[in-house]
Amino acid sequence: MFEGLQKNLTAALRRLTGAGRLTEANMKEGLETVRQALLEADVNYNVATAFVQRVSETAAGQEILKSLQPGQQIVKIVYDELVQLMGPVEHGFHWAKERPTTIMLCGLQGSGKTTTAGKLALTLRERGRRPLLVAADLQRPAAVDQLKVIGDQLSIPVYSETGSTPLKVCLNAVIHAKKTALDTIILDTAGRLHVDEMPMEELKDIDRQVKPDDVLLVCDAMTGQDAVNSSKAFNEALELNGVILTKLDGDARGGAALSIKEVTQVPIKYIGVGEKLDRLEEFHPDRMAQRILGQGDLMSLVEHVVRVQSQVDQEKLAEQQRRLAKGDFSLEQFRDSFGQMKELGIKKVMSMMPGMDMSAFEELGDDPEEAFVRMQGMIDSMTKEERSNPDVIDLSRRRRIAAGSGNEPHEVKKFLEQFDVMRSMMRQFANMSMWERMKMLTGLSKAGAFMPGSKMLQKTKIGTGHRKTAKERAEERKKKRKKGRR
């Protein structure tokens, strides 16, 4: 969803980082380009203007123009302001001790509220809770039936009544939960197509009499500024504890995610990233800021892969995070991740990889999934020793692997070179500061990246990225020295 914003914002920042010397004039011009990029992403006008103003004031306060790396420091300031704009976020709930905890979901019709109720119930059950779904939306046709179907799919109980009122359904659901030893109640309330048509009095009655511990608004990210306006209206009526932003896997421009917290002072707690019932994630402002600035999101990528694989303990998750962040993984592990990558969506996975140029997909005619099949064939044609230690693969082995996978020996060679580039890049990323990462990515955007769809892989079917030899690097340094003497 942030592809357009990432492309425009990165281009705007590159103008600043690429300037040999920053002046007040070109910094003002560059920050105006940043503001324009935010506006094009449907960020609220006042939010975009205030954001750029804060960046400008912070830069002036730190005497950026006099520093040795002014452009890189601007990037760090923009990152910090993005994190502050969307955070902080507390993902926990106000758990009750002597009674079931009640979570009330509200939102416009079509925002994905009922599906989100099921996703939230599944998430909480995975954390050891015993949830009860409550069908309190008696206005929309088939809303009760939809919730029952979701409950059956997840094996989570659903409470409903016929010929009743939403308030009575909610009150009786609390009694039912106590009797059946269920400790978490999720209320799926009624919605309308427009906020002006919302039954706010009905929601206020439920809020006053049921006294939910948390009130969460479900917003459709595709609606852009309407999501911000509806958040403001619901918060004035109910005092929201948080927002769940849905449909972030679509082509929304990202303005809602950047605007809601600033306008309403209500944090985004969770985001929906797909139609499947396990596609609900905690919202992390720092990770989202990294993705917006083109730095990828390795931690979320690992969590995605682990979620698709199986239920694992936190120690194993942390270990996989450390290994991926350091680039410490083999071809065998890379091969094992293909299934999860297909399950998650290859483009989505690639958007989380640092330095990935998603616009290159538009320039390539090849299906990225076919490129992955090629790589999978190469790895399958290797021995166990070769997969764990690619350095042992010489010319004769490359020929055998190429014959076994239906590729050419030089394609196998380039694949191995790019795998090494990616692993090295991950290792460097783990030990870099924010501006060092941005500087590295500026170079990567020119050279391309490792995965299918990157500019580095456009010259052959699976890639012919060129790694400079020591001689070529020496020649480059010699040319730079000559240019400096002039």
Image (spheres, helix red, strand yellow):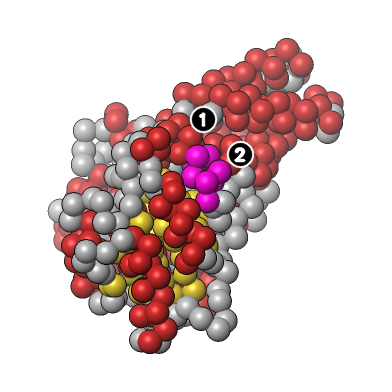
Mark 2 touching mark 1, by CB under 8 A?
Answer: no
How far is disc 2 from disc 1 in space, using C-alphas? 11 Å
Mark 2, secondary structure of its residue: helix
Mark 1, secondary structure of its residue: loop
Return the x and y of residue 325 as percentages of the image width and height.
Answer: 53, 60
**Residue at mark 2:** 262
Q: Residues within 10 Å of mark 1 (few under 14, many from 20)?
A: many
- Which numbered circle lies on residue 9? none
Question: In the picture, residue 341 is in which quadrant?
Answer: bottom left
Regarding residue 64, the answer to whether it shows in the image is yes
What amino acid is labelled 1 in the image?
Val
What amino acid is labelled 2 in the image?
Glu
Question: In the picture, residue 358 is in which quadrant?
Answer: top left
Seen from the viewer's position, the closer of residues 161 and 192 is 161
Q: State the quadrant of the N terminus.
A: top left
Return the x and y of residue 94 as percentages of the image width and height.
Answer: 57, 69
The magenta stretch spans residue 34: no
Please tell me which residue is depicted at 25% across the width and 44% down the height of the picture.
Answer: 368
**Residue at mark 1:** 43
